[in-house]
Image (spheres, rainbow, N blue to C red):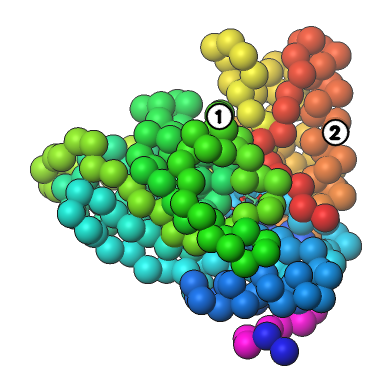
Amino acid sequence: MLEGLKTQIHLSTFTTWKIGGFAQYLVEPNLYESIEAVRWADNNKLSVYFLGNGSNILIDDTGLPGLVIVTRNSLMGLRREADYIIAESGVFLPHLSKFAAREGFSGFEFLIGIPGTVGGAIAMNAGLTVFRPREMTAIVQDFDVLNLDGSIETLTMDDVNAEYRHTDLLDGKRLILQARFRLDEAGDPTEIKRNTFEHLAERKRKQPLDKPTAGSTFKSPPGSKGAGWYIEQSGLKGFQVGGARVSPVHANWIENLGSATAADVRNLIDHIQATVDKRMSISLEPEVIFLS
Ligand SMILES: Cc1cc2nc3c(=O)[nH]c(=O)nc-3n(C[C@H](O)[C@H](O)[C@H](O)COP(=O)(O)OP(=O)(O)OC[C@H]3O[C@@H](n4cnc5c(N)ncnc54)[C@H](O)[C@@H]3O)c2cc1C
């Protein structure tokens, strides 16, 4: 049996939406245990799912049949080596942002308000389109991935065809173990910290951070308007399905009012897409990842 293996774990506490069915198996491995975990799943012919902080995923109410590998509590190593920062994939992005500021690395400020892990952010090519636009491609030098057969390789963001909120890693066939971030621009730590916290204050004013959400539900469509603008113009701000509601603060965010199921959120997403398409002739593509 695999060290630290848990069974029938409810996944709602592993996502920021606080939604999700049971994991058949769940493990929170360190670097070496990760290799054993994927081999164990392979030997037992089980599907494997990767979770960082669960801040961009909707897990089906029926749960995940197979092995869920969670990184946020176990792959947390973080250090500086010359002009690079090495972070394991479970490192929380705000923690990386503060560490970079202390070390005088400018350009990591945008991570302060993104409640994900290094692995999730690389897989998503997370970033900002507002405030000061920037994404992971700007700071990632390269990263180590574990393939499902237990082999390890080093890849760059180009190798995984990173584009706006997408990389090939979202096919779920490679676990990011750790990443190397480069120092592009040195700065004064005090000034970097000030910029970082100004950015955070701006986000707090404009986003519903007191509710369980997954941030932006849809990607920005081409053009200058964000998805939230189209949703609001379609009259959907505050629209509710079961326990899921279009945020009255920011229409591209869906709030769990306490009892939302994944089905409520899926139905609300379908309704938003159909309504915006009909009223504004705009096709909205989900940014959130559906796991089932
Ligand atoms: C309040 C709030 C604000 C947000 N703001 C932003 C924002 O400004 N910009 C932005 O881009 N996003 C934002 N998000 C969404 C989310 O935080 C990011 O997409 C984040 O990078 C996801 O990281 P995670 O660790 O939570 O990934 P998860 O949600 O756990 O996973 C996302 C995807 O990555 C995969 N994955 C996770 N870890 C690994 C790994 N180690 N190896 C391989 N695949 C992995 C998962 O299987 C899944 O497909 C926000 C979310 C919230 C709740």
Residue shown at 28% from the left, 44% from the top = 182
Element on which disc 2 rests: helix
Q: Quadrant of the C terminus?
A: bottom right
Residue 274: x and y, percent?
Answer: 86, 23
**Amino acid of disc 2:** Asp
The magenta segment: 3-11
Residue shown at 58% from the left, 63% from the top = 151
The response on whether ligand 1 sits within 8 Å of label 1 is no
What number is the disc on residue 270?
A: 2
Q: Earlier in the sequence, mark 2 or mark 1?
A: 1
Q: Choose between 172 and 144: the one closer to the eye.
A: 144
Q: Which residue is mark 1?
A: 163
Looking at the image, residue 218 sits to the left or right of residue 262; the answer is left
Residue 264: x and y, percent?
Answer: 85, 47
**Amino acid of disc 1:** Glu
Frontmost of labels 2 and 1 is: 1
Looking at the image, residue 275 sits to the left or right of residue 156; the answer is right
Reply above or below: 99 against 75: above
Instruction: Tell me if mark 1 has few (under 14), some (14-19) or many (20+) residues whose alpha carbon lies within 10 angstroms of its own.
Output: some
Residue 136: x and y, percent?
Answer: 44, 39
Q: In the picture, residue 7 is in which quadrant? A: bottom right
